[in-house]
């Protein structure tokens, strides 16, 4: 309608007044071109990610859910009574329910996410199922400095929850920095963190190249989002999804590959892509149990128990802050 057109117009006129616009233009201006995967998660991207989690090839979600289910009593015992959970990057909030169901009178739940709409929908669904729980969603970028509400009177320990191996999105330096800041925020409490494990590259490859093309759509949504929000003019058909295992760096890399030489326009600026030139959209680092634990020690945590699945696909770590 008319108001949509006015909206699009004002976005076109002030597109740089926006972190996504700035980071995308900066990414397109440097070589190699790379942008933070946090921009995948607008409303559409969060829904695509939820579909990824249900794909037969994408083992991490279902494996981590199994680990949490099998060890919920043990994990809850480590949390103790009246604990509060701070979840970094809350998605569909499926995993925390397993913890809440096993915990002794959880005091409060603080899910933090950058996708506000997605978060408030998931948080109110959770609140309905746990009427006695104090649920306080925090719309924030947890990679930036975080201010959390003071502990509740009479509360138990504050437990950070960072499932899904989202830690793998960070570079090793960023992961160390995130864990250092998190150790400070959680001091006296603990962090429960999921980390995907190094394994047969064929299994990894399949997980990021699913047969239904959902991961490809998730990757390409970055460009679709730029078209929607920034008035960019990416032709999605002219870019291909690429995901491969970089063995020396122990990570899956995702890229968007230009299928031909082309010009793209973002907020009035033009950028050229050569045929085969890529925009690097994501790293997903894989860990060994020891590599995750030694990273945690360097960040100021004291490692506790580790839970895994029978096939050693995934790990969940208890880290004392
Ligand atoms: C949310 C970062 C853990 O790396 O596996 C899934 C994101 N990207 N498929 C991952 C993702 C492509 C996911 N993390």
Image (cartoon, rainbow, N blue to C red):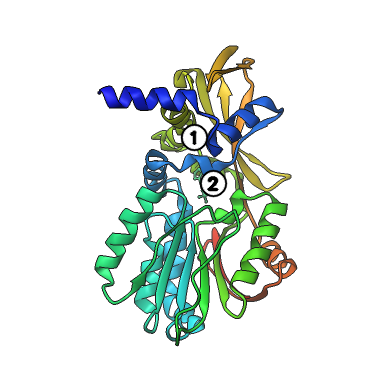
> What label sits on residue 235 in the rendered view?
none
**What whole-number distance in Å separates the C-alpha atoms at marks 2 and 1?**
19 Å
The answer to whether residue 19 is seen in the rendering is yes
Q: Identify the secondary structure beneath mark 1.
A: helix
User: Looking at the image, which is closer to me, 58 or 146?
Assistant: 146
Q: Is mark 1 within 8 Å of ligand 1?
A: yes
**As drawn, 5 above or below 94:** above
The picture places residue 291, in percent across and down from the top left corner, at: 70, 62
Question: Can you say which quadrant of the picture contains the C terminus?
Answer: bottom right
The picture places residue 196, in percent across and down from the top left corner, at: 57, 56
Please tell me which of labels 2 and 1 falls first in the chain. Answer: 2
The picture places residue 60, in percent across and down from the top left corner, at: 48, 54
User: Looking at the image, which is closer to me, 67 or 283?
Assistant: 283
Which quadrant of the structure image shows residue 217? Answer: top left
Which quadrant of the structure image shows residue 246? Answer: top right
Query: Relative to residue 295, is residue 261 drawn left or right?
Result: left
Query: Relative to residue 295, is residue 97 drawn left or right?
Result: left
Label 2 belongs to which residue?
Answer: 203
The picture places residue 129, in percent across and down from the top left corner, at: 26, 68
Identify the residue shown where x is 56% and y is 45%: 204
**Badge 2: few (under 14), some or many (20 or more) residues near its Cα, within 10 Å?**
few
Label 1 belongs to which residue?
Answer: 219
**Badge 1: few (under 14), some or many (20 or more) residues near its Cα, within 10 Å?**
many
């Amino acid at each position: 309608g008319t108001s949509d057109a006015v909206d699009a117009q004002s976005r076109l006129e002030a597109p740089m007044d926006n972190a996504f616009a700035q980071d995308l233009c900066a990414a397109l201006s440097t070589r190699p071109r790379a942008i933070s995967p946090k921009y995948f998660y607008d409303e559409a991207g969060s829904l695509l990610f939820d579909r990824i989690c249900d794909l037969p090839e994408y083992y991490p979600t279902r494996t981590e859910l199994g680990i949490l289910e099998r060890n919920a009593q043990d994990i809850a015992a480590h949390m103790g009574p009246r604990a509060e959970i701070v979840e970094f990057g809350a998605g569909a909030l499926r995993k925390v329910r397993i913890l809440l169901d096993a915990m002794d009178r959880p005091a409060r739940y603080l899910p933090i996410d950058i996708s506000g709409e997605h978060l408030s929908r998931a948080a109110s669904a959770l609140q309905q199922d746990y009427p006695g729980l104090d649920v306080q969603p925090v719309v924030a970028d947890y990679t930036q400095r975080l201010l959390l509400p003071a502990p509740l009177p009479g509360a138990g320990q504050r437990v950070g929850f960072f499932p899904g191996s989202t830690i793998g999105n960070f570079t090793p330096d960023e992961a160390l920095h995130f864990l250092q800041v998190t150790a400070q925020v959680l001091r006296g409490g603990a962090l429960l963190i999921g980390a995907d494990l190094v394994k047969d590259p064929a299994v990894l490859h399949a997980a990021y190249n699913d047969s239904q093309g959902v991961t490809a759509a998730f990757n390409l949504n970055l460009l679709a989002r730029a078209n929607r929000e920034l008035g960019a003019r990416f032709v999605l058909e002219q870019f291909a999804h690429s995901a491969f295992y970089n063995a020396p760096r122990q990570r899956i890399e995702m890229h968007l590959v230009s299928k031909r030489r082309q010009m793209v326009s973002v907020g009035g600026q033009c950028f050229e892509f050569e045929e085969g030139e890529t925009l690097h959209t994501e790293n997903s680092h894989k860990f060994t149990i020891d590599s995750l634990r030694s990273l945690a020690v360097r960040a100021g945590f004291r490692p506790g128990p580790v839970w895994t699945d029978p096939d050693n696909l995934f790990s969940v770590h208890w880290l004392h802050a």
